[in-house]
Image (spheres, rainbow, N blue to C red):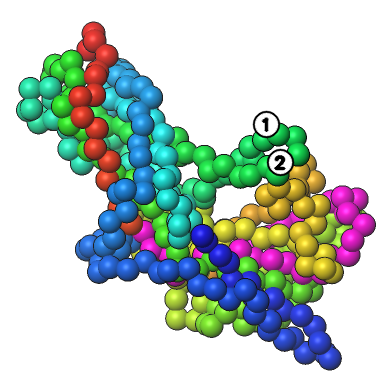
Amino acid sequence: MNLQRRWSYVRCLGAVALLISGAICTPGVTGESAGDPNEAGRDVTDRFAFVWDSVEVSSQVFNPSYTGREDLYECGRRTLTVAGKIHVLDANDLVGMQVGDPNVLQVVDGDDNGLAWVPLPVRPIRHYQELKYVWAVPQNPSATPEPVLQPYDVRVSFCVDLSQDLPASLSLFQWCAHAVYAEDVIEVDVPFEASDDWLEAAPSLQIRVTKATVECCDYTYWTEVRHAGGTVQAFDARLSPAEPIADYLVMRTLLLDAEGQPISTTEDDRVSPAVWSERVDSTSWGTAKCGGSLLAFITQAEIESIRHVIVAHPAEVKVPFTLTDLPLPPGY
């Protein structure tokens, strides 16, 4: 079971006191580096299952003299795509996955011959996606709804030259995604009050509220998060594959009332996008900038603090998947 550590700032006798509650750490990611600075050596294959839904083959012919972009089509102008879902069987310590633009490892045809292929000619980007839950409606009306973890939708694509005949099937198809595990997930509450001062959110982690106002019809705020001697990024930042994962990843922010409860709490502690907006961005100097606004008419409560949900000491782990006897569509 994953538990969270919560750090809160409260005003007391004119000072800012740091309160720690529920301080229980989840197990950390173990293992030695596998060479890639983003990967920790840990076998988590049995925690996931990939089920393919469809196999697609598409081809196009371009006129290089017209487009002027011959380099984009050196893959052979034919794309093979395997679409499916990654089911998370064990979510312990897992905070998200990188499933866009997966890496293809090996392709073998039905006669056990290696199929010649190349990656898609696109710039690879790392983009983590959080775990997604939906609230299941129980058959018994008196039962309490429970969150159900949803699978990740995935499309694995690569290029095959038009001069190469496609087989009727693939005897072996291997590819990989990347999972992000965390040593801890912390919740840090800071006053809804602008200040030039940096507040100690956790050891070596600081937050500053640069804006906190009630303007006309809404509450608006901006904060900055930094780590002494390290980096902080937005959880869903788009990064290059060579860039190391940050020491801390900021997932989201929430506005809290005087009792420490999220404003207009819903099943996932969020309010309607029509009246609430928030964003977290990475900056070029290794910090995260957070901001948001809430329409004032949505609540009669006074906004007391801003909560930051932060992944502490994440590690990226390669998750390989293997398919056998995968049929290919005819006609190509």
Q: Secondary structure at mark 2?
A: loop
Q: Quadrant of the C terminus?
A: top left
Mark 2 vs 1: CB contact within 8 A: yes
CA gap between label 2 and label 1 equals 8 Å
Label 1 crowd (10 A; few <14 / some 14-19 / many >=20): few
Q: Position of residue 100 (x, y in %)?
A: 40, 41
- Please provide percent x and percent y for residue 125: 39, 48
Q: Residue lying farthest top? A: 331
Q: Is residue 57 left or right of residue 283?
A: left
Q: Dot 1 corresponds to which residue?
A: 139
Q: In percent of the image, x 53 and y 69: which residue is there?
A: 287
Looking at the picture, which amino acid does disc 2 mark? Ala
Secondary structure of the residue carrying numbered label 1: loop
Main secondary structure found in the magenta portion: strand
Question: Which residue is tagged 2?
Answer: 143
Give the answer, above or below, for where 141 lies relative to 93. above
The reply to whether residue 203 is visible in this rendering is yes
Residue 135 among magenta residues: no
Q: Which stretch did the figure color magenta? A: 289-316
Q: Is residue 151 above or below residue 54?
A: below
Q: Is residue 328 left or right of residue 230?
A: left
Please tell me which residue lies in front, 130 or 224.
Answer: 130
| Residue depicted at 57% across the width and 79% down the height | 202
Left or right of residue 103: residue 27: right
Q: Say whether residue 311 is magenta.
A: yes
* Kind of residue indicated by mark 1: Gln
**Residue 243 appearing in the image:** no
Question: Tag count in the figure?
Answer: 2
Task: Count residues near mark 2 (Cα–Cα under 10 Å), then give few for <14, some for 14-19, many for 20+.
Answer: few
Quadrant assignment, res 291: bottom right
Residue 190, label in figure: none
